[in-house]
């Protein structure tokens, strides 16, 4: 037996639609709350993207000119040419504001591009593996195991040493080491979807494999992929920082946050701002993206309330 | 030639050494190895001075780079950390004086050159290896042969070697194919190991030498522990235990010095040095070293074939500002293509910081708008190298010379360097023997072809300098060579490095030398 | 069970062989000649060639590979090009240190993330849940070398609680192991939380509640053991990232382990060491994962291996 809302007006006031049951109204409220929460956690991420894109245009970064007389000045100092270094200067006198903004752009570029490429690779490998199973699946799993057995950072070192230092090569390196996670997720989703009724129905109506995959399965893999992507983004940016620590990250004229932090690590006790300010920015962004991913996960996979 | 600069303790040590030296001349008492001796031609008294002290305490040192191994005759022989570690374990025939380009007797009591092609070394008697076996001339011969056979970085020093004779247990005759004036510097890098044991597998994981310390344990990458050698022929070391602890990360090393986990370290960047200056438990000493930074131009490639372009690059640099800001406390302005601590150094006319003149020279060389080029280098060459490279790019950019950053890993950099596949090369270099020959003749002759510079007049001068044993004549020749290389701007030589040591209070009698440090004189008072 | 083990072992051999072969080829593809590096800038071309011949590097790749396989089968892995001791010795000297570091980090990570994840799951969507999320993510949102250096500055230099660097006993282990463990905490906490949430939704748990059993008993008796499977799986998989983190942590803290050795060996093109180290790492990884898979049978009685 269902309980209906007494009037349309009551329904609207409590957040539901005319004709809703109480349960449906509650559902709708919960849904709206989820969307609001999602949007709230998405704001910092969007802000970061805007800053990364617009920032370096407003405060351009000059990778060449040094100002030795102004080196290692704390945040807020007025420099010899009268300008104020709001975030301080680095070990050769370059302004940190411009560097941090440039770093935002580079880190964002590396993170997003890597996740996109790795995601595509994962999709291309995981869907056929999950759908066809058998030999293809076996091959993929062996290959993935092989790659996982080999520590990702070391694989990155080897690739970076062969290809040399450039932003593109860093993206390639990191994509190659991270596609496996995406492949696993898409494979798992495909496996689950494969046996569902709508796929069997589609097959019964004579739809070809490609059509089934593209129309039905792939769209369903997108949501779990996006959730994984939010976690992977942070890990990619950190992996790039590790590469920079070892001297194999982005080149010096395209400094990522990781490179600025790595280069400033000998100054942590004297000029802490060189490493710490981009470090804080990095952490905030990764946390924001990660928490947004958590929210996205909750939104996409609402669980029945327990306890 | 140079007295160690820096704090009072440095000068005090020198005074003490002079006093010991004077006492030695007067009464035949030997002080430390480094002061022993009255030079060639006189036999030294037997070992064990009445003023011998008992080694006490432990000194813990952390070197700036890992100790890669303990084989001073093999392929890693030139690694500074290795040389520092083995300096206490092995002896050499002679040692370089810490304060002057003179060579003092060590295992060799005297030496002479009966003819221009021979050097005869007479070993002091009664020297024993750590296992009790006697050190003989045969061990010297075997060590030299091993050094040459393994083709390590010091093997090329011995290209002129003809043969080694051992007429008796205490005499070594080294014959060269051409007259060789740089024999003493070369021999100061030849560690003597026991002939009967040196080829056994694993010998160099716990080697036996004749030096003031013997090896207790060696955990690679972690720790090397040495203890005083009770049967040492010279003065006993000041400490009973000498530990080398491996701490690669600068922040951790400085922390260890501050907390007292280590007693001594060096190779610190200027900003860390500034941070240490306030500490009451740590004092800083500095000394000029043999290391310096240089940028070569590939003289076989346009536009560097034109000396005016090279000189323009020298005028474009504000070296004084670089030294004052980036290199504060760790470097000073260079005034010759070899460091001021080397034998053969002669100061040259400095290139003033003059961007107008630089542009003028470029215009005269038909490059009024500058040009583009790439600089290869390896970012682990030395302190502040990254910052220095950035500064160089910036100054050159200001006169229109756009330099691309071609940094690479060491093997790749070395490959390109030796193939002459580069425009500019930036690196730190060290005059390992403290003698101009090591740098000038090996790197700047036409035959060497290391930077494409070809000047027959320079070749003549350098060859003459190595083939004479008359040291004052050599000095004159090297002065001429310095002038040519400098004025022709074969490279730019901005900075020579000063080595700063951090010592904890209680660490005394550390001898400052431009070379790698040694620790047998150090005492630890707690 | 027997045939399953045999299959797994055969498969493991394949993976190990694959990894070693790939590394063998790739490491020789990196530009830069180890012989030249050793001879240094002053040697002649002849010296370099002589050294290459001594190391067998002048042979064609295929020949080198076959020789290597042959020697490896006899457990002879050649001498380190640089250190002039057997490569296997160089690695085995350092493997215990890395194992201790990684093992401690793993234990610490699991021990931290379990309570955190449980708390978060039980107080879902509350402030506590959010707080746990942020805290657990700290390890995943700061560069590990930065964290390590900060630890040194704070705990070694500032508070003097621990030594700053070096290999040794418990006191030397704390800072590096903590730095490394923090990497895991984020992943594991999240997993524990969602795993527990999934389990708490299950019918048998609801019925246990309905029976009136206390929360703690429900969790310990019913929920936890089932939740352990994904946790244990992830722990096995995270070994790779743990090792990657170990490379950095070993360098920062001067911990004499295999990670540092491997990075230096790659920089110096010391092929024998790179190959042996990869062999060890791969074998270790496979062993751990095999143990993980076998533990499923213990943890979940429904799983049986035929």
Image: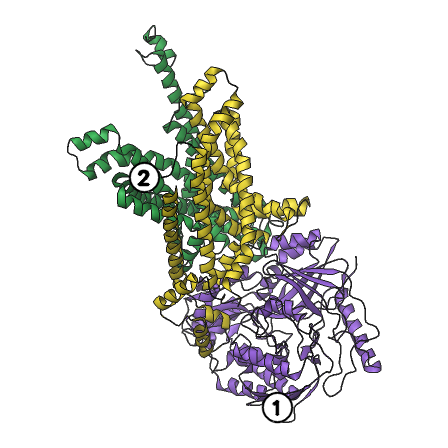
Badge 2 density bin: few <14, some 14–19, many ≥20, Cα 10 Å: many
Q: Give me the chain letter of mark 1.
A: B
Q: How is the image coloured?
A: by chain
Badge count: 2
Q: Residue furthest top?
A: A6
Q: CA distance from mark 1 to mark 2?
A: 78 Å
The vertical placement of B516 against C260, above or below, is below
- Note the chain letter of the green one: A
Residue beneath the point at 36% across and 14% down: A23
Task: Work out which quarter of the rendered image holds the N terminus of chain B and state it.
Answer: bottom right
Q: Is residue B179 left or right of residue C186?
A: right
Q: Which mark is residue A159?
A: none
- Chain B, chosen colour in render: purple
Q: Which residue is mark 1?
A: B118
- Chain C, chosen colour in render: yellow
Label 1 SS: strand
**Percent from the top left, x then y, of residue C161?**
68, 44
Q: Residue furthest left?
A: A206
Q: Which residue is mark 2?
A: A187
Using the rendered view, name the quadrant where residue B246 is placed.
Answer: bottom right
Using the rendered view, name the quadrant where residue B12 is placed.
Answer: bottom right
Q: Nearer the viewer, residue A207 or B10?
A: A207
Task: Work out which quarter of the rendered image holds the C terminus of chain B and state it.
Answer: bottom right
Q: Nearer the viewer, residue A145 or A267?
A: A145
**Percent from the top left, x then y, of residue A255?**
46, 51
Badge 1 density bin: few <14, some 14–19, many ≥20, Cα 10 Å: many
Mark yes or no: residue A88 visible.
no
**Percent from the top left, x then y, of residue B66?**
58, 62
Observer-side mark, 1 or 2, equals: 2
Residue beneath the point at 46% across and 59% down: C276
Q: Give me the chain letter of mark 2.
A: A
Label 2 SS: helix
């Amino acid at each position: 037996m269902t309980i209906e809302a007494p009037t349309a007006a009551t329904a609207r006031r409590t957040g539901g639609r005319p004709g809703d049951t109480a349960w449906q109204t509650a559902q709708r409220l919960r849904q709206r709350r989820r969307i609001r929460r999602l949007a709230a956690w998405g704001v910092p991420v969007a802000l970061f993207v805007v800053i990364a894109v617009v920032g370096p245009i407003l405060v351009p970064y000059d990778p060449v000119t040094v100002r030795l007389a102004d080196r290692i000045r704390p945040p807020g100092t007025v420099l010899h040419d009268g300008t104020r270094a709001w975030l301080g200067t680095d070990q050769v006198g370059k302004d940190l504001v411009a560097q941090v903004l440039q770093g935002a752009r580079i880190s964002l570029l590396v993170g997003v591009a890597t996740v996109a490429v790795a995601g595509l690779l994962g999709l291309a490998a995981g869907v056929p593996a999950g759908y066809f199973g058998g030999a293809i699946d076996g091959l993929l799993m062996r290959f993935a195991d092989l790659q996982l057995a080999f520590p990702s950072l070391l694989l990155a070192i080897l690739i970076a040493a062969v290809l040399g230092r450039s932003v593109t090569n860093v993206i390639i390196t990191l994509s190659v080491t991270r596609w496996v996670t995406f492949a696993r997720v898409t494979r798992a989703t495909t496996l689950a979807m494969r046996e569902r009724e709508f796929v069997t129905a589609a097959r019964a109506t004579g739809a070809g494999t490609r059509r089934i995959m593209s129309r039905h399965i792939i769209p369903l893999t997108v949501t779990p992929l996006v959730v994984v992507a939010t976690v992977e983004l942070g890990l990619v940016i950190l992996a790039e920082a590790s590469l920079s620590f070892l001297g194999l990250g982005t080149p010096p004229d395209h400094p990522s946050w990781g490179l600025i932090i790595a280069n400033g690590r000998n100054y942590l006790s004297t000029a802490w701002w060189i490493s710490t300010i981009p470090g804080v920015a990095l952490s905030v962004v990764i946390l924001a993206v990660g928490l947004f991913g958590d929210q996205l996960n909750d939104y996409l996979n609402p669980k029945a309330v327990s306890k | 030639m140079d007295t160690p600069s820096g704090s009072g303790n440095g000068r005090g040590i020198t005074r003490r050494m002079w006093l010991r030296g004077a006492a030695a001349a007067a009464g035949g008492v030997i002080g430390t190895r480094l002061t022993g001796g009255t030079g060639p031609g006189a036999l030294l008294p037997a070992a064990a001075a009445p003023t011998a002290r008992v080694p006490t305490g432990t000194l813990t040192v952390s070197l700036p780079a890992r100790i890669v191994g303990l084989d001073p005759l093999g392929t890693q022989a030139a690694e500074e950390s290795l040389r520092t570690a083995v300096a206490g374990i092995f002896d050499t025939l002679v040692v370089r004086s810490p304060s002057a380009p003179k060579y003092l007797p060590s295992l060799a009591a005297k030496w002479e050159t009966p003819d221009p092609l021979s050097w005869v070394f007479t070993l002091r008697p009664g020297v024993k290896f750590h296992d009790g076996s006697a050190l003989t001339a045969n061990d010297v011969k075997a060590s030299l042969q091993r050094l040459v056979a393994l083709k390590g970085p010091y093997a090329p020093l011995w290209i002129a070697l003809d043969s080694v004779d051992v007429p008796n247990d205490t005499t070594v005759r080294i014959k060269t194919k051409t007259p060789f004036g740089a024999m003493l510097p070369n021999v100061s890098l030849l560690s003597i190991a026991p002939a009967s044991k040196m080829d056994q597998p694993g010998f160099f994981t716990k080697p036996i030498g004749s030096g003031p310390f013997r090896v207790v344990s060696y955990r690679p990458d972690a720790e090397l522990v040495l203890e005083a050698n009770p049967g040492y022929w010279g003065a006993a070391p000041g400490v009973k235990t000498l530990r080398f602890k491996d701490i690669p990360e600068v922040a951790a090393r400085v922390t260890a010095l501050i907390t007292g986990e280590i007693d001594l370290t060096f190779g610190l960047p200027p900003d860390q040095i500034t941070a240490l200056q306030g500490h009451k438990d740590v004092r800083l000493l500095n000394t000029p070293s043999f290391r310096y930074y240089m940028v070569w131009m590939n003289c076989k490639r346009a536009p560097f074939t034109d000396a005016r372009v090279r000189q323009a690059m020298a005028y474009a640099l504000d070296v004084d500002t670089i030294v004052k800001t980036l290199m504060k406390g760790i470097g000073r302005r260079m005034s010759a293509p070899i460091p001021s601590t080397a034998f053969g150094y002669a100061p040259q006319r400095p290139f003033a910081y003059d961007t107008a003149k630089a542009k003028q020279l470029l215009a005269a060389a038909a490059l009024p708008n500058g040009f583009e080029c790439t600089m290869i280098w390896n970012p682990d060459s030395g302190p502040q190298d990254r910052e220095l490279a950035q500064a160089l790019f910036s100054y050159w950019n200001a006169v229109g010379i756009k330099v691309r950053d071609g940094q690479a890993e060491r093997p790749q950099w070395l490959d390109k360097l030796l193939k002459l596949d580069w425009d500019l090369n930036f690196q730190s270099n060290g005059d390992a023997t403290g003698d101009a020959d090591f740098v000038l003749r090996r790197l700047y002759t036409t035959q060497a072809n290391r930077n494409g510079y070809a000047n027959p007049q320079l070749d003549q001068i350098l060859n003459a300098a190595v083939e004479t044993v008359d040291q004052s004549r050599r000095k004159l020749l090297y002065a001429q060579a310095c002038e040519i290389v400098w004025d022709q701007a074969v490279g730019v030589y901005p900075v020579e490095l000063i080595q700063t040591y951090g010592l904890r209070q209680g660490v005394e009698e550390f001898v400052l030398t431009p070379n790698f440090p040694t620790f047998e004189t150090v005492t630890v008072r707690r | 069970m027997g045939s399953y083990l045999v299959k797994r072992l055969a498969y493991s051999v394949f993976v190990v062989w694959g990894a070693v072969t790939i590394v063998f080829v790739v490491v020789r593809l990196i530009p830069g000649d180890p012989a030249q590096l050793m001879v240094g800038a002053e040697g002649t071309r002849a010296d370099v060639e002589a050294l290459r011949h001594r190391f067998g590097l002048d042979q064609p790749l295929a020949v080198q590979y076959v020789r290597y396989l042959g020697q490896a089968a006899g457990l002879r892995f050649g001498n380190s090009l640089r250190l002039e001791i057997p490569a296997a010795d160089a690695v085995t000297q350092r493997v215990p240190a890395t194992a201790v570091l990684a093992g401690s980090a793993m234990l610490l990570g699991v021990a931290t993330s379990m309570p955190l994840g449980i708390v978060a799951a039980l107080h879902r969507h509350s402030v506590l849940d959010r707080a746990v999320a942020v805290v657990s993510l700290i390890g995943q949102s700061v560069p590990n070398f930065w964290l390590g250096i900060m630890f040194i500055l704070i705990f070694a230099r500032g508070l003097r609680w621990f030594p700053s660097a070096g290999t040794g006993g418990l006191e030397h282990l704390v800072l590096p192991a903590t730095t490394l463990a923090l990497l895991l905490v984020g992943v594991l906490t999240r997993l524990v939380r969602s795993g527990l949430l999934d389990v708490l939704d299950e019918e048998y748990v609801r019925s246990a509640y309905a029976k009136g059993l206390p929360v703690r008993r429900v969790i310990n008796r019913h929920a936890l053991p089932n939740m352990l499977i994904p946790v244990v799986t992830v722990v096995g998989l995270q070994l790779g990232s743990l090792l990657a983190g170990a490379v950095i942590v070993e360098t920062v803290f001067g911990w004499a382990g295999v990670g540092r050795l491997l990075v230096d060996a790659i920089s110096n093109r010391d092929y024998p060491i790179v190959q042996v180290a990869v062999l060890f790492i791969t074998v270790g990884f496979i062993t751990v994962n095999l143990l993980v898979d076998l533990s499923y049978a213990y943890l979940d009685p429904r799983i049986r291996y035929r």
